[in-house]
Amino acid sequence: MRRFMPFYRGLWRLLFIFSGLLIAWQLIISLFDIPPYLLPSPWQVAKQLTLQWQLIAVQSVPTLMETLLGFVFGVMCGCSAALFLTYVKPARLWFLPVLLISQALPTFVIAPLFVIWFGYGELSKIITCVLMLFFPVASSFYDGLRRTPQDYLDMAKTMGASKARVLLRLQVPNALPSLANGLRIAATFAPMGAIIGEWVGSSRGLGFLMLNANARMQIDMMFAVLFVVIALTLLFYFAIDFGLRRLIFWQSVN
Amino acid sequence: MLKENGIELDELYLTYDNNVIFNNFSLSVQTKQWVGILGASGIGKSTLLKAIAGLISPELMNITCQGEIAYMAQSDLLFPWLSVIENILIGYRLRGDLISPALKKETLDLIEKVGLSHVQDLFPPALSGGMKQRVVLARTLIEKKGIILMDEPFSALDAITRIKMQSLSAQLLKDKTVLFITHDPLEALRLADVIYVMQGSPATLSKPLVMQGDKPRNFNDSVLLSLQAQLLDQLGAQA
């Protein structure tokens, strides 16, 4: 049970920060007398959440699906790119700029294009998500693969190992802690990618809900959905983090 | 004619950063002989071993190795994601060789010989320095190569553990040809049949110091201790 202790402590800290922010929020509203159509009180947001929870829950499903699929495909694309760059060294010079371009593209500008190209449905959102995750995953994994200690490679060479097996048995496991950092970033980006994709054009999802609430000046609804998005992102992050800690068990031994 | 598991190195010429490290350097190691090379850090001892192991390509080298080489690097180099037994068999995994039941049994016997049976399923971060070194020894042995190159194999261990590891290695590697480098005169005196001191730039070897008697030699033997003093003087004189 000991290994879960830091997690519980983290949870308490999170609750503490959360309630602190709520109190500060309420204080600002009371002190400056801000009208509800500019900034609703936590109480109003909570009311919206309880009233609209069914609608929000239903609309969370497509967003969650897009997040999950976007994460899976984004990680697959990023990892393949990193493996390719490591295995085929000459490709590096040609492919590295492509990697950078993928990150330089402003997502908000390119996302509407995806809607035009890939339609109103889930696909365009998943692709937006993949585009956002590709770089952090590819660069962190590639970095880890590149940093294989020379001693490991020397030993493998004296043992007569093939290049592919060195990559699979030594370089990949050695790069996992580095990849994990990229995956943690990706876990927080993935819901954002789905929401951005929905925001620029969709007929369902939490992004769609927020877009509607925004257009109708339903700021309390907007905030209510925002809370759900934050909660889902945190949940997704902690789930990924938990999985990674178990997978890369040798890092937490010390 | 060179016998099985011997090394004959000639005309080694190697530069690094425009410095000539070796110029017309030669060394020979006979079958089942243990050769220890002593020298200060940075003189090119590790480079020599790497050249023999084929890890670096010198500008010029004339080498004959009758037999296959296993190389034990300076650090213990265990993989933290593999258990002790998986670490020992990593060579087979890296070559894609089949791990037969016979090999598995041999490995388990070897693990028992090096005294690691109780930790064979643990992972390296849970092991002490001496245990890690035993894993490395077992991994080197299971490779079944005739020639062993060791680069300061026990330098990271405390004095007592180092003495124990030297004895264990001498016992388990007694049928192998061994070329090792060290900066510890006592280690060379306990383990080597022939000791060279490496010095200068480009590096040269001193006259061989030929040792008698079975290895590992007793570390409180008076002849050994006076030779240790002599070697320390010799090493100190160059520094």
Image: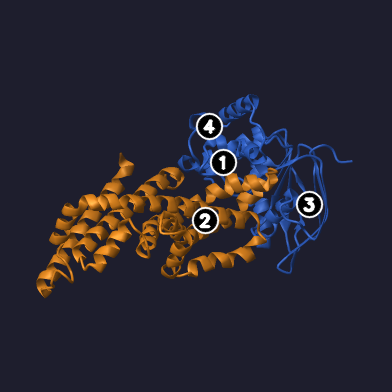
At numbered mark 2, what does the secondary structure look like: helix, strand or loop?
helix
Q: Earlier in the sequence, mark 3 or mark 4?
A: 4
Q: Chain of mark 1?
A: B
Amino acid type for the residue under numbered disc 2: Gly
The answer to whether dots 2 and 3 both sit on one chain is no
Chain drawn in orange: A
- Residue B201 in percent (x, y) is at 74, 64
Contact (CB < 8 A) between labels 4 and 1? Answer: no
Q: Which marked residue is nearer to the observer: mark 3 or mark 1?
A: 1
Q: Which mark lies nearer to you, 3 or 4?
A: 4
User: Which residue appears at 54% of the width and 44% of the height?
Assistant: B79
Question: Quick one: A135 or A228, which is closer to the camera?
Answer: A228
| Shown colour of chain B | blue
Which residue was labeled with disc 4? B116
Q: Which residue is mark 2?
A: A78
Q: Which residue is mark 3?
A: B207
Using the image, name the chain to which the residue with label 3 belongs. Answer: B
Q: Residues within 10 Å of mark 4 (few under 14, many from 20)?
A: many
Q: Earlier in the sequence, mark 3 or mark 1?
A: 1
Position in image of residue A30 (x %, y %): 10, 70
Q: Amino acid at mark 4?
A: Leu
Give the distance between the C-alpha atoms of the residues marked 2 and 3, in whole angstroms: 58 Å
Using the image as rendered, state which of residue A122 and residue B27 is in the foreground.
A122
Chain letter of the residue carrying label 2: A
Tell me the SS state at disc 1. Answer: helix
The chain identifier of the residue carrying mark 4 reads: B
Is residue B154 rendered to the left or right of residue A129? right
